[in-house]
Amino acid sequence: MCLAVPGKIISIDKGDSLARMGRVDFAGVVREVCLAFVPEAQVGAYVIVHAGSAISTLDEEEAEKVFDDLRRLDEIMGAESEKQEPTV
Amino acid sequence: MKYVDEFHDPKACRAAARAIERVTRRPWTVMEICGGQTHAIVKHGLDELLPDEITLLHGPGCPVCVTPVEMIDKAIAIASREEVVFCAFGDMMRVPGTRTDLLGVRSKGGDVRLVYSPLDALKLALGNPERQVVFFAVGFETTAPVCAMAAWRAREEGIGNFSLLVAHVLVPPAVEAILSAPGCAVDGFLAAGHVCSVMGYTEYEAIAAKYRKPIVVTGFEPLDILQGILMTVRQLEEGRAEVENQYARAVRREGSPAARKLMGDVFRVTDRKWRGIGVIPGSGLALREEFLSLDAETRFEVAEVAAEESSECISGLVLQGKRKPADCPAFATRCTPERPLGATMVSSEGACAAYYRYRRS
């Protein structure tokens, strides 16, 4: 029910407040989407769309952090488990 | 970055599962609130990647599943009227009411339509001024803003033949209901990412502090869920009970101020009955007085009907994480997605339907 899909804004029809609409590209499928709740989002931005309305703008830097954290963790833990292994 | 495939990467998922295994020292029970996350966990077998110490419980986060039978019966009564075009999300079509479902109404000649957005229903109202178009407004805080938008536009543009049957529910009161129930087995929660992208997560900070339980705002892709579990377990092992945000690419602490404002302008908080659970105080939304002319319950004077649940269905216990779907004697025998006894077998996000589809044992 709370399913929401990321897509890229390709155009914005009306610029102001609650009537703000635009077209969003979902990997090739383009739909008209309400952009009133993401007033900061401009053409080219990725938004999360639920039931015909964008609910959030996606932040690429934060998205990358998921992988950075994981990489760091894997390195630290990999190093720790090597240390713990008995040496002959 | 396309924000989907990257978070399905098997190598990254295995690294996250390894990390969970390494931080886990004691047994812990983690509940994912959202039915979308339940679906992803069962579909991708994420629970099978976890160490034996970690138990996942599936929460009540499926609005279709928790909409009470009385409300389904009201929808059926309205949809059966000759002048009505009744619009609903696809998931609602097969949810059993006392005697029939919305598809049953359609097969008897009712004008019941599946829509993707309440704004599509509003367009139908504009294009069919001689018909009464009703939208079944079901959903959590993720869905409420776009329904508020439809109500607001209907009033602004004077679209008199549009109304809403409102059954919105709110997540934090349900989390509190689970936490304050006697014998609550949940040690930590994954909070639903999309609800939080609208509402932010300040409400959860008070809950985490009051009940001393970690809550991690989590996304919906396999890697998101595994990382959410990792962050929860790490807090539990370190004795912390904080709100952390795994889904920071889509969720800010304050949520979406524009969405929250319109929601607050159109709706007020009310007590709401949850199917299989009962009334949870302050857990629903109803139209504010200024928007009551758009209320379908009043417009069509739908009376309270004495609704009946299947006596065999244990969906209430499944929704509270007290039973797993396969514990039900009717599971996959007398209850299937084609002939469901309860709503958890209908919605693609219902725990019973997810187990039926991906794991029939």
Image (tube, rainbow, N blue to C red):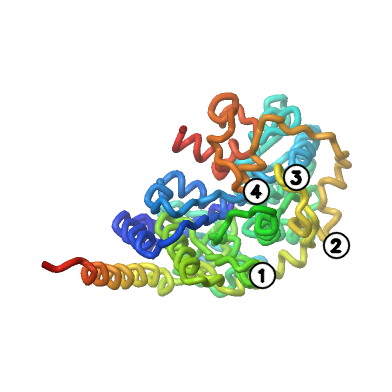
Counting other residues with Cα less than 10 Å from the Cα at mark 4, is it few (<14), some (14-19), or many (20 or more)? many
- According to the picture, the residue beneath numbered tag 4 turns out to be B63
- According to the picture, the residue beneath numbered tag 3 turns out to be B134
| CB contact under 8 Å: marks 2 and 1 | no
Taking the spot 37% from the left edge, 55% from the top edge, the residue there is B8
Name the subunit of mark 2: B
Nearer to us of marks 3 and 1 is: 1
Report helix, strand or loop for mark 2: helix
| CB contact under 8 Å: marks 4 and 2 | no
- According to the picture, the residue beneath numbered tag 1 turns out to be B210
Which three-letter amino acid code belongs to the residue tagged 3?
Answer: Val
Q: Specify the quadrant of the image occupied by residue B179.
A: bottom right
Q: Which residue is more in the foreground, B1 or A41?
A: B1
Which three-letter amino acid code belongs to the residue tagged 1?
Answer: Lys
Report helix, strand or loop for mark 3: strand
Taking the spot 73% from the left edge, 30% from the top edge, the residue there is B110
Determine which of the numbered discs, if any, sits on residue B290 in the image.
2
Which three-letter amino acid code belongs to the residue tagged 4?
Answer: Pro
x, y percent for residue B210: 66, 70
Where B2 falls versus A79 (above or below)? above
x, y percent for residue A10: 47, 64
Which three-letter amino acid code belongs to the residue tagged 2?
Answer: Glu
Counting other residues with Cα less than 10 Å from the Cα at mark 1, is it few (<14), some (14-19), or many (20 or more)? few
Report helix, strand or loop for mark 4: helix
Q: Specify the quadrant of the image occupied by residue B102.
A: top right
